[in-house]
Each structure stands twice: as C-alpha cells, then as structure tokens.
Image (tube, rainbow, N blue to C red):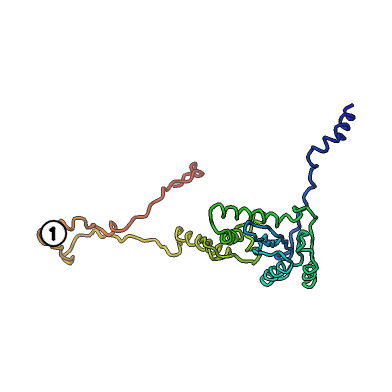
Amino acid sequence: MDQDVERFVKTCHGCQLASGSSNPEPMTPTPLPAGPWQDVAIDLMGPLPSGEFILVCVDYYSRYYEIYIIKTITSEKIIDCLEKMFIIHGLPVTITSDNGRQFVSDEFEKYLFENNIEHRRTTPLHPSANGEVERQNRTLLKRIKIANAEGKNWKIEIRKFLLAYRTTPHSTTGVPPSELMFNRKIRTKLPEIQFSLNDGEVRDRDMFRKEKITRVRNSTHVKEFREPEVETSEVTNDDPPALSLPHGDADAFTDVPSTLSDTLPTRPQRDRRVPVKFKDYDMG
C-alpha cells in the first residue's frame, strides 16, 4: 500500500505543475588551460541606464579579464574590441560565447576562422554554462550600482576596481590574476617589498648568522691574562721617591686603585667540585 500511495502522489497532475524543478545536474568544471590567454570567454552586459553595453572577456587560466564600454553591439564592433585585446595578449586558442546574434553572425565566424580560433557556444538559455564570465558580470554590475549610489562616475570607479581585482589574490588560484597573466607583479599604491623571495631568504640567513656570531665569542682570539706579581722586598734607596701632592689636593686621589689588579675586570670563577662518580675514591 505504501508503494501505491507514493505512486499516486508522484503522478498527481496538479502536484507536478506546482512543484519545483528537479535537482540540477552536477556542475562540470572547466579544465584549467595549460597557460594564460589560451581559452577565453566573452559576453555582453547591458544595456545600462546610460544606454551603453560592456563587453567582458575573461581568461579561464588566470581569471584576468578585459572590458570595453561600447554603444553599439554589432559584430563589427565586437571584432574591433577583440582585435585591440589580441594586439596586447595575442590570439587565443578558443573563444566561448553564448548564442547572441553578434557572436553567431557570418562576419564573426569568418573572423575567428581566419585567425584559427575555435568558437565554442554554450547551450541556449543556459547562462551557467559560461559561468566564469557571468560571475564577472555580476561583480561589475554591483560595482556600478555602488558608484551610482555614492554619486560617483561609474566609469572611473570601474577602472579603480579593475586594478584592485587584478592585483588581489584570487580565491581559487590564490595568485593575483595579473601575476598569472604576465608572470610578474603589477605595482600599486600599496607599499611592498621589491626584492624577490630568494633574495629575502638570503638576507634572513645572513642576518641570523651575523647575530649568532656577535653572541658567541671565538676562543681562538682569546688568551688567558695573568696578573703581574707584586714584590714584597723592603724598600731600598733606589726606589723612586714618593709622590708629593700639593696641599689640599690629596682628596682628589683617594679613589686611585692601589694595585693594577683593581683596575682590571675579573672573570667569573666556576665552582670546582669532585665529580659524583669519584666520591668513593681517595683523590689524594
């Protein structure tokens, strides 16, 4: 009876219409390319309140992305923006895009074919298939809304945001996108150490060794000092005369040490004892 009830509920027409969609298919992550700017994704974001669009191009390897603010979204304009990117970064191996009319036109396909670039299209009405660039679109849109709420020029704020994003370690790779893209660090206003990691290790070892040497004395440059012996024979006439001091100046020499040993620092003496293992022996 339990199986009959379960079957009856699952086949209810009204329940199937009102219930939520089935569980989504598990995500298939995009394999990491072998290097930067080999596999890229492009997308258009907009229209914005100003009537403009933003063309976003993301590198799958470094997560570095370029943007262009455009007013027309024809295939010719998209190609013009891509050529400006390719002059800087070179031609990618593949380009992933949705099925927008700008990306499926004969003109766009011809341009990719002439430059030996493979065009990969996502599933229609399935934006998550191009999730990397869609994620960047949400971030850019959020930054634009913040700039408008604060009464700032959103185009200037987007430039500041791009510099901060490119020089901040990515949550997935742990490395700034610019460093993975160009194999170097981009200088910002934040203070940073200019020497390399290897140079820092050398400096640390050098400082450690020098500090250790200053705390440990090298015994090869130290020798025992023996105090001079003081003769106890009677004073003869050959002894030099006693020093005569002017009247009233005697008190000035009351602190003068009587012997040379008083002027020299004494070394600490260790406590000398017979070892415990010899306590039953007569050491003479």
Disc 1 on helix, strand or loop?
Answer: loop
Relative to 16, is 162 on the left or the right?
Answer: left
- Closer to us: 181 or 42: 42
**Residue closer to the observer: 268 or 165:** 165
Query: Residue 279's spot in the image, x, y percent?
Result: 48, 42
Direction from residue 118 to residue 66 in the image, left or right: left
> For this rendering, which residue is in front, 279 or 102?
102
Q: Amino acid at mark 1?
A: Asp
Residue 273, how many percent across, how many down? 44, 46
> Pointer 1: residues within 10 angstroms few (<14), some, or many (20+)?
few
213 sits to left or right of 110:
left
Q: Residue at x 39, y 61 (%)?
A: 224
Mark 1, residue position: 249
**Residue in view at x 54 percent, y 57 percent:** 152
Asked if 134 appears above or below 111 in the picture, the reply is above
Q: Percent position (x, y) of residue 113?
A: 80, 70
Res 47 → quadrant: bottom right
